[in-house]
Amino acid sequence: MPAHALKRPALLALCACVLVAQSMVAAINLLIPQLSSSSLHPSHSEILWTVDAYVIVFAGLLVPAGALGDRHGRKGALLTGLGLFAAGAVTSALATGPAVLIAGRGLSGAGAALITPATLSILMQLSAPEHRARSMAAWTLSIGLGGAAGNLGGGLAGQFLSWRALFAVMVPLAAVLAAAVAVTVPRTERSTGSNPDPLGTLLLTAGLVAVLFGIIEGPTYGWTSARILGAFAAGALLIAAFTLHALRSAAPLFDPRVFASSRLRAACLGTATGFFGLFSLFFVNSQYLQGLKGFGAAVTGVAIMPLPVGMAVAQKLATRWAGRPRAVIGTGLTLIGLGLLGVSTADAGTPYGVYACWLLVISAGTGLSMPALTLGVVTSLPAHQAGLGSGLGTTARETGAALGVAVTGTVLSAHTDLAHGMGPALRTVALVVLAATALVIAGYSSRT
């Protein structure tokens, strides 16, 4: 397939797919009060698993899902992912008990794991080299729009409809997207050099799931509890076993020696850092606007709209300055950190207009940095492993997001209420973001 084969309808269809997959990460958070009082009568632990099942399965399967698409066909992986996503939504919408709801969320997360790397890999395969930065900007903007759309959709469903309606509407939406993909997206050449590597896939997936479980559940069970320490230990051992297996295998899932590149390490760290800050904001945003400002669920969903606006404007600059990734990434990540410091000063008396200005600073930083970081991860691997590269980048993104929520939740839990804990939590996250930014800039200054 020639590089100029990417047409606007295909670009829109691919971006819409990743937007919808990302939206279901955030949407469920605004429905927690309704779920808690629903006829399912879920326990506190079951509510947490309803929220987390999607993210854990999604992030845990990203790398093997990307490799699977490279090997067996990216368009086929995307269509299969949309089918699994819809099947999970049906299961969730019709759930008769918490266990069925959690299973549905996990199934949709598996679908999202196939959707996300496939979309980016197809964009990389079809975009001419001079247009790749623009394609990456559109794709990363869709990620941000997905978060905003999830907040908006969850807020509207929480106030005017029901949690079942949110899941039900995903089914025809996935069907429409599948039809659009089938019609507009051409097939790309399969990679005979990509290997599913069943043992490596099992080791890496189990290791990532264990680590993510520890990160997400750490604030609930305590970071020094036997359950969490055991999860981290198991994750470390499994990932170490994967590394040894991959180094010795003639056909590994991927060669861990790719991380010898300081630029790849910096791009992964930068991606995780940006979403660490962004999802920390998402975690406190709805609590702040509803709990301290008194906004309704629907208005809360609308109130986060400055984020996609800032991303859309900044990504145009990111495309224009694509030839200077170090400066663009450093500036963008610094803006995220400074914006979080600004938000940390907000309280019940802060005018929404001031709060929105800080949201614009954070979104501008995201829009500047993420296209270059995404391109940096994907282009660090050979072209035939674009799906695997996308999986690595998205794994870094989701891991950073999970850490942002976990760290913010941990700091908040040490204070009596949100009013006293929000400032310290966001300042902690902001300082981590700024410190990590210095490491990312140093990595991009290296030649290797």
Image: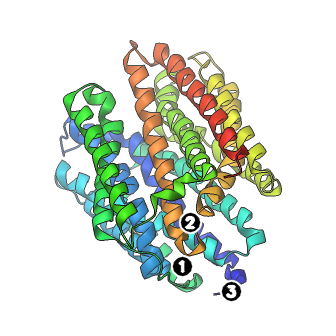
Secondary element at tag 2:
helix
Q: Earlier in the sequence, mark 2 or mark 1?
A: 2
Residue 24, how many percent across, how many down?
43, 53
- Rendered residue at 54%/33% (across/down): 281
Graded by Cα atoms within 10 Å as few (under 14), some (14 to 19) or many (20 or more), the crowding at tag 2 reads many
State whether residue 442 is above or below residue 241: above
Which one is nearer the viewer's eye here, 427 or 228? 228
Q: Which amino acid does label 2 sit on?
A: Ala
Residue 166, how many percent across, how many down?
39, 55
Secondary element at tag 3:
loop
Q: What residue type is labelled 1?
A: Ala
Q: Mark 3 points at which residue?
A: 2
Residue 125, how many percent across, how many down?
62, 76
Q: Name the residue under label 2.
A: 16
- Real-space CA distance between mark 2 and mark 1, rounded to the nearest whole angstrom: 10 Å
Query: Mark 1 and mark 3 in contact (Cβ < 8 Å)?
Result: no
- Rendered residue at 69%/79% (across/down): 7
